[in-house]
Amino acid sequence: MGASATFATGVLKRLSPGENNAPPADTLPGIKPGPGGTIDTLAQALAKRVATSSARTTQQNKSSATLEQITAKVETLATHRKEIQLAADQAWPWRQNGVEAIRKAFLLPVDRPLSD
């Protein structure tokens, strides 16, 4: 939670009635408790901010996990890159017609065989 939300939460606690409807710790002129009052509006805004922040954090965690998985798979594929390219070079020889696009997709030269 950011500094402004922490401050707002502190203000809300001081202005809200306590347990068993005990009077609030502080009062301010023009700040109305109860449904539809200023304190209720502040409480709703804080709840919305906390929910949004929580959803954002959850999404960031999911995105980080997905990125880690992708990175691991890319590293695995990178170790097999040369093998894959050699297999593609054999499957789609450069002298064969109509293989230019597939050779480009495998990062193979289109006018000669793959060299080491």
Image: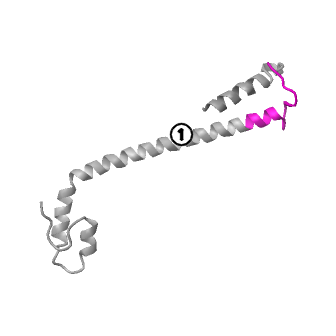
Judged left or right of residue 40, residue 2 is: left
Q: Would you say the magenta stretch is mainly helix, strand or loop? A: loop
Left or right: residue 67 compared with residue 3: left
Say which element carries label 1: helix
- Residue at the spot 24% in from the left edge and 52% down from the top edge: 78
41 is higher (above) or lower (below) than 69: above
Between 112 and 23, the one lying in front of the other is 112
Residue at x-position 20% and y-position 66% = 88
Which picture quadrant has residue 17?
A: top right
Q: Within 10 Å of the Cα at label 1, are there few (<14), some (14-19), or many (20+) other Cα atoms?
A: few
Among the 4 quarters of the image, the one containing residue 28: top right
Lateral position of residue 90 relative to residue 38, left or right = left
Membership of 28 in magenta stretch:
yes
Residue drawn at x 68%, y 27% as measured from the top left = 7
* 9 or 65, nearer to the observer: 9
| In the image, residue 66 above or below residue 91 | above
Q: Is residue 11 above or below residue 62?
A: above
Residue at x 72%, y 38% (from the top left corner): 45
Q: Is residue 27 magenta?
A: yes
- Give the tally of numbered discs: 1
Residue 56: image location, x then y, percent: 56, 42
Q: Residue furthest left?
A: 116
Q: Position of residue 62 (x, y in %)?
A: 47, 44
Residue 16 at x, y percent in the picture: 79, 25
- Residue 55 appears at what percent x and percent y? 58, 42
Please name the residue that numbered disc 1 is placed on.
Answer: 57
From which residue to which does the magenta span run? 25-44
Q: Image quadrant of residue 102?
A: bottom left
Rendered position, 24 above or below 73:
above
